[in-house]
């Protein structure tokens, strides 16, 4: 299927940077699950894919981490996994919070690799990446940001969307990277939701604070 606004050339060296929790939230809000194998093949068949990074935080003090199958699956299937332990704290209202911000790791990797790339594809709507995108562009690298404006409110920050060379609506890409809905596992009421085959993740909004 042709994707509107897709501007990737076959001779370009590209790298994919996936903000895991951000992409998960955007896709789920749009009503579909990511098939990470299809996602990788979509870009491999359209350009020279140098690297595909996936960033996520892990809760390491649990006897079993539901997100571990995702990490292992991606690690064995063409992705470079970047993880770090989450940090717990109690807010002013006594609620338990978990921090797992991966922005610094993503920024360092993108800056280091940018000199070997023609094009960066960022799966995130986080406005904190606007300055990073600007820095990479000044090295002569094009940047595509993939997120969505079709939710209320939009899940991509306006400043990030404006800074990108190309903004690609995630909903327009969905038919190329979504998992067959018939393969979707039944709903779970766990702290995390997971799919061992393709690897989905979700931190409960009231328990996972991405700031900090």
Image (cartoon, rainbow, N blue to C red):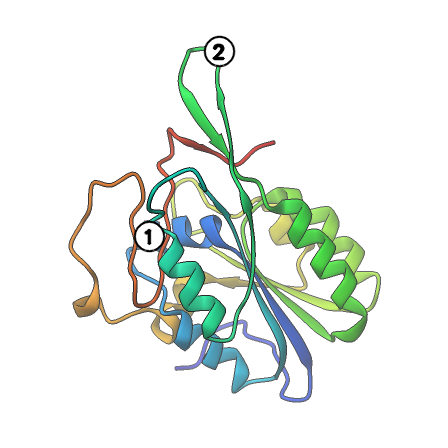
Residue identified by numbered label 1:
28
Residue 127: x and y, percent?
61, 43
Residue identified by numbered label 2:
92
* Secondary element type, mark 1: helix
Residue drawn where x is 83% and y is 61% of the image: 138
Mark 1 vs mark 2: in front: 2
Q: Are marks 1 and 2 in contact (CB under 8 Å)?
A: no
Against 35, residue 122 (above or below) is above
Would you say 79 lies left or right of 30 here? right
Identify which residue, 8 or 20, lies in the foreground: 20
Against 125, residue 146 (above or below) is below
Residue 6: x and y, percent?
54, 74
Q: Which of the marked residues, 1 or 2, is nearer the chain's N terminus? A: 1
As measured in the structure, the alpha-carbon distance from the residue carrying label 1 to the one carrying label 2 is 30 Å
Would you say 99 lies left or right of 32 here? right
Residue drawn where x is 57% and y is 44% of the image: 157
């Amino acid at each position: 299927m042709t994707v509107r606004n897709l501007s990737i050339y076959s001779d370009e060296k590209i790298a994919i940077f996936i903000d895991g929790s951000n992409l998960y939230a955007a896709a789920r809000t749009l009503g579909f699950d990511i098939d990470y194998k299809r996602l990788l093949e979509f870009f491999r068949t359209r350009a020279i894919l140098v690297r595909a990074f996936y960033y996520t935080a892990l809760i390491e003090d649990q006897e079993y981490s539901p997100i571990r199958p995702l990490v292992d699956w991606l690690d064995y299937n063409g992705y470079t996994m970047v993880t770090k332990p989450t940090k717990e704290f109690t807010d002013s209202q006594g609620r338990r919070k978990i921090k797992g911000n991966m922005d610094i790791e993503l920024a360092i990797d993108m800056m280091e690799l940018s000199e070997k790339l023609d094009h960066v594809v960022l799966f995130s709507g986080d406005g904190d990446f606007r300055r990073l995108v600007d820095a990479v562009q000044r090295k002569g690298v094009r940047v595509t940001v993939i997120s969505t404006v079709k939710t209320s409110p939009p899940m991509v920050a306006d400043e990030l969307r404006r800074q990108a060379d190309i903004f690609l609506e995630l909903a327009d890409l969905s038919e190329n990277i979504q998992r067959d809905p018939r393969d979707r596992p039944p709903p779970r009421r766990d702290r995390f939701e997971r799919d061992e085959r393709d690897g989905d993740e979700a931190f409960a909004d009231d328990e996972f604070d991405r700031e900090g």
